[in-house]
Every structure is written in structure tokens, then in C-alpha cells.
Image (cartoon, coloured by chain):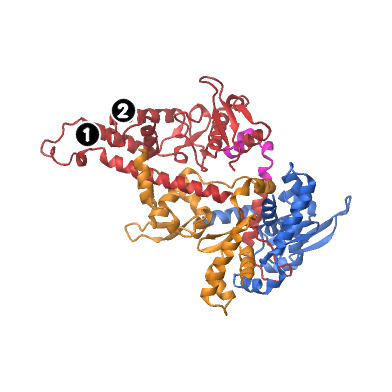
Chain colours: A red, B blue, C orange
């Protein structure tokens, strides 16, 4: 884990559907991280291409394949459930690699070189994926703006209103559930540690930043009593980095990692 | 500062008191806050718009101007029916499930002031006064009314679904 | 007329469409309604207040101005709303630009299963079911909802930048 410029931070960034599924896992921790809550194989490839500043039209396929497989190994070690599409991509990469090793077809050699390049389809797939990642970024920015405005809470403007109310029992229950949910979320600390979810951990971390501006990275892990709690804490920190509420940095290489809260952007 | 004050009066569920602005602008002198507020109210109400800022219950509140109420009502009727605000709905839900209940207890559960919402519910006769709680201050106890049962098509309060049933219902719908 | 329009936009829970004003002012010519609306929006947004009127989802809506969000949030004691994950945003981007689109088509573009993200989007009503594709298996077709436009402050889908712009960006990035 390194500062915000660290190579792998953005790859493991998580979504709101961060779920810790409870599949069979090693060490009896009962903890499996479902990878579909993270990113997909195309994201990993794009990440590697950008990190290594590779020309997308000339991907060193052997090198990339090797890196990709290394990541799969790490995921297995972390107990991350590797979904089928990751294996499909691994097979595709190995297939392209083997095709690249074959001597070019002499008959078609003069024909469009590009069309015969076994990497072409993957390149277009990556470009297409990047296109939609850019579109998603745009939506993210728009959402940020919309998050900064409020619509008036509709209340009863006409104080003498005798209108019929269009509220169903369902609405009423929903409202109550909302209250209960809010009420319970205010009592996080009373919850037994076994039940600490990422969301709760995030709230806990937010609370510690209400008091402190900067904390050391390790301080979040000293109190952890189980591996599960360590992972939950780690994922919660990542989520807060993603939400741009905190950032991680080092004064110098190998020094203690610091975490600071980010001031809300004005 | 006036623009922020205006925005806050606009979003507030309850009338905003002058002291609350002191918390929002801790670096400003109370006098300049008072002046800015007075200037805001005067300026806002001088413009020929559809809303005005009124002093209600010791605070400032944005409302429509009474002279437009006929047309506003005509507009509201084009909708399927006036909805209760989320604040009123939540308050009603708390009263329905926790009755008899005092305003302070509602506040504790909702975590928000609920007096305006309660006022609305009383006016709409969905909620009624059940008596007083025999503790210090003898606060009023609220409960749901007969209107409430009629509106929600319930025979009795025992017909209210439990939260568990609701969770199941919601689950089935998805 | 402008004052009544302002009051109605203020009380409305949803963006108010120009046609709705025609029902409220049946005696006015559509042209003069349009002109009054344009003049209202321009005048309202020119004043240095805390609110503004914006065109969202084909209608007019009053909101606070984004620049005051810090103080309003402090007053309301709210946290930034639950934001969508990058996975959900990507899925939403695919749906927005490729609609009507099936889950299998989303999978092909994103290169990974997207059912959890889609579930989130459906629950938040940003995405809706448009029907079924008349191919083997009759898969469900998804598209964006009106809520999507409101959530992202868009007047219509035509307000979205074109996909070509993003393609060019992708070419430059890689």
C-alpha cells in the first residue's frame, strides 16, 4: 500500500456493492471477497497498459500475459473469488501469445498486416471499454455537481390544505424503515465486532477524522482483532479514498503512511 | 452571506431562527448577521416574485404568496394528490408504530425536529392527542386517528404490517 | 404570470413542464407562456440569490446553487448522498449510450458480469425495463429513466456528450 500515486491503488478500488460474501475460504476466516464487486479483466489490462506506458497498438503480449497471470495469483492468495471472465481473458491472452509465435502466413503476408494481427480484436475491445470508462467519469462529475444542490423538501405550503393525500401503506412503512435504519446507524458502536461491515467501518473512520486531521495508516490496524477486520478496515479506507474523503501519502519513501482528510471541495 | 441564508431558509424543514445563523457563520458578528437577515427579508419580499420570507414561530420561513394560492391549488390538483412530505410521513410512521408517543420521543427516534410535520399531521387529522404522559412536564401523547385507519384502509392498528412482513414484501417486488 | 410560475416551480416536487403551465393559464397564448417562462428563468437566475431555476428532465426545477453546498450541508448535517460506484456508473454509461440494451450486450462491452451493478441501478430507479428483445430467449431490454435525467441534472439525453468525444479521449489516453 503506498500513496495516491501507488501503482495498484486504483485497480483495487471498490464499488458501493462491496460485499464480503461468506463462501468457504482458507484459514477458517469464512471470508471471501467477491471480485465482481471490484473491476473486471479489461480494467486490469488497461491499468497495466497505462502503468507501463505501453503503445496500445503494439502490446507486448508475452509481458502483459505474464503480469496478468501474476495478478490472478495475488487474487487467489487474497482469497478473492476469481469469476469466469478472468479465466476467459487469461485463455484469450495465452491464445494470442501462441498465435504471435507462429510464423506469418506467407500467402496473406502482403495483405493488410493489421487484419491479421491476433491482438487487433482485443485492442478494439480495450478502446471500447476505455470509451465507456470516460463516459462513466463524465457521469461521476455530473453527479458531484448534483450532489451539491438541494431541492426544497416538499412540505405543506398551503397551510389550509384539505387535499386528498396520495400516500399508501407501503410509503408509510418505507418511511418507518428509513427512520429505523437511520436510528440504528447511529448506534454503530454497540454492534459486536463480528458484525462490522465495510459501511460501518467507513462511518467509524469518518468519525475518527471528525476529531483528527491526520492519522497514521497503521493506527487503523493495531486494534484489529481478526483478519476479517483487517480486510474490512483496508477496504473501508480504499472506499474513502475513492470517495475522495481522505488521501494517503508518505513524506518520504518507506516512511509511515499518513492519512489525511480532504477538505470538501468548494 | 445573504445568498447562503436564502438557500438555507429555502431548504429548511422548520423555520430557521436567527441564532442558527450564528452557528453557520461563527466568524460573523451577531449584529452583522441580524442586519444581513433583515436586508435579505426586505430585499426578497420587495421583488415581485412568487415566494416570500415570513417570520413564523420565531424563525424565518419561505412560503408562497397567499395571492397566488388559487392558481397553486389548481396546479396541485392536476397531480394525483398532495403527497405528505417525507418529514411528515416519517413522523406519521413513528407515531403509528410507537404510539402513544411524545414529541420528544419522536425527536429521539427520527433524530430531527418534527414539530412542523406533527402540526401538519394534526391539521390533516391523521394524528390526534391521546392525553398526557405522567412524567415531569406532562408532555402530550400522540397517536393515530380514525382518519388514519380510513386513509390506509386498515380495520384496526393490529392490521399494520410488521417490519418483517414489509421487508419480505419489498423483497418480493424486486 | 411570472410570479405564479415561480411559486409553482417552488412548490412542485418534480420539474414542471411548459405544457403544465398551459393548463394553469388556459387563457394565455402558448407563445406568451413560453416568453414569460424564459423571462422568469433569466431574471431569477440573474439575481444574486441562493437558489436558481434549472431545466431538468424537460421541465423547470428550483434548486440551491451548488456554490453554497458546504454551508447548506453543514446546516442540514447531511453527508454527500450515497454515490454510485464506478462499476454502476460504467454500467449506466453503457445503458445510456446503447439503449435499448440487454444484459448480455452490457457484459460484452464491460468484459465482466454486471448484474449486481444493474440491480443497484434498477433499485435506484435510474434504469428501467423497456421491453424484451425479439431474439432467442427474449432478453430484457434496459434503458435510462426520467430519474436518470434528474439525478445527473440533464434536460434530455441529447445533453449528453457524444460517444465520439469519449472515443477520441480514449485514443489519446492509450
Residue C22 is covered by the magenta coloring = no
- The residue tagged 2 is A63
Question: Which residue does the image show at 67% across and 67% down from the upper left?
Answer: B48
Residue A99 is tagged as 1
Identify the subunit bearing mark 1. Answer: A
Which mark lies nearer to you, 2 or 1? 2
Residue stretch in magenta = A183-202
In the image: residue A135, left or right of residue A236: left
Q: Residue sitting at 33 percent across and 37 percent down?
A: A89
Q: Is residue B61 left or right of residue C69?
A: right
Q: Residue A247: x and y, percent?
A: 55, 32
Q: Residue at x 43, y 39 (%)?
A: A39
Residue at the farthest top position: A254
View extreme (left): residue: A107
Q: Secondary structure at mark 2?
A: helix
Residue B69, placed above or below residue C79: below
Magenta segment, prevailing SS (helix, strand or loop): helix
- Is residue C75 among what the camera can see? yes
Amino acid at each position: 500500500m503506498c500513496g495516491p500515486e501507488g501503482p495498484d491503488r486504483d485497480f483495487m478500488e471498490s464499488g458501493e456493492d462491496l460485499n464480503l460474501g461468506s463462501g468457504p475460504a482458507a484459514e477458517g476466516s469464512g471470508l471471501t471477497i467477491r471480485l465482481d464487486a471490484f473491476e473486471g479483466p479489461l480494467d486490469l489490462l488497461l491499468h497495466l497498459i497505462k502503468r507501463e506506458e505501453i503503445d496500445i497498438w503494439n502490446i507486448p503480449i508475452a509481458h502483459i500475459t505474464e503480469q496478468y497471470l501474476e495478478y490472478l495469483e495475488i487474487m487467489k492468495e487474497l482469497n478473492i473469488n476469481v469469476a469466469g471472465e478472468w479465466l476467459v481473458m487469461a485463455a484469450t491472452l495465452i491464445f494470442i501469445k501462441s498465435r504471435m509465435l507462429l510464423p506469418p502466413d506467407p500467402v496473406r503476408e502482403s495483405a493488410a498486416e493489421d487484419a491479421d494481427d491476433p491482438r487487433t480484436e482485443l485492442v478494439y475491445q480495450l478502446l471500447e471499454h476505455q470509451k465507456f470508462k470516460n463516459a462513466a467519469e463524465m457521469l461521476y462529475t455530473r453527479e458531484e455537481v448534483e450532489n451539491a444542490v438541494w431541492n426544497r423538501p416538499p412540505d405543506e405550503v398551503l397551510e389550509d390544505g384539505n387535499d386528498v393525500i396520495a400516500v399508501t401503506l407501503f410509503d408509510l412503512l418505507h418511511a418507518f424503515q428509513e427512520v429505523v435504519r437511520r436510528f440504528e446507524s447511529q448506534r454503530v458502536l454497540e454492534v459486536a465486532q463480528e458484525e462490522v461491515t465495510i459501511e460501518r467501518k467507513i462511518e467509524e473512520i469518518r468519525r475518527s477524522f471528525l476529531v483528527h486531521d491526520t492519522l497514521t495508516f497503521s493506527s487503523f490496524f493495531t486494534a484489529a482483532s481478526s483478519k476479517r477486520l483487517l480486510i474490512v478496515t483496508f477496504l473501508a479506507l480504499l472506499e474513502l479514498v475513492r470517495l475522495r474523503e481522505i488521501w494517503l501519502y508518505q513524506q518520504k519513501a518507506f516512511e509511515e503512511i499518513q492519512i489525511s482528510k480532504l477538505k470538501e471541495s468548494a | 452571506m445573504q445568498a447562503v441564508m436564502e438557500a438555507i431558509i429555502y431548504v429548511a424543514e422548520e423555520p430557521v431562527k436567527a441564532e442558527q445563523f450564528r452557528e453557520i457563520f461563527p466568524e460573523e458578528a451577531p449584529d452583522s448577521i441580524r442586519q444581513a437577515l433583515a436586508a435579505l427579508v426586505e430585499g426578497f419580499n420587495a421583488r415581485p416574485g412568487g415566494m416570500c420570507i415570513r417570520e413564523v414561530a420565531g424563525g424565518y420561513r419561505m412560503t408562497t404568496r397567499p395571492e397566488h394560492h388559487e392558481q397553486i391549488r389548481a396546479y396541485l390538483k392536476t397531480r394525483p394528490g398532495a403527497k405528505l412530505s417525507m418529514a411528515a410521513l416519517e413522523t406519521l410512521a413513528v407515531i403509528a408504530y410507537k404510539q402513544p408517543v411524545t414529541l420528544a420521543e419522536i425527536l429521539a427516534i427520527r433524530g430531527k425536529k418534527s414539530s412542523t410535520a406533527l402540526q401538519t399531521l394534526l391539521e390533516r387529522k391523521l394524528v390526534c392527542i391521546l392525553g398526557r404522559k405522567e412524567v415531569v412536564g406532562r408532555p402530550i401523547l400522540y397517536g393515530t386517528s380514525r382518519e388514519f385507519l380510513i386513509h390506509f384502509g386498515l380495520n384496526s392498528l393490529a392490521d399494520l404490517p410488521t417490519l418483517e412482513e414489509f421487508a419480505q414484501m419489498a423483497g418480493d417486488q424486486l
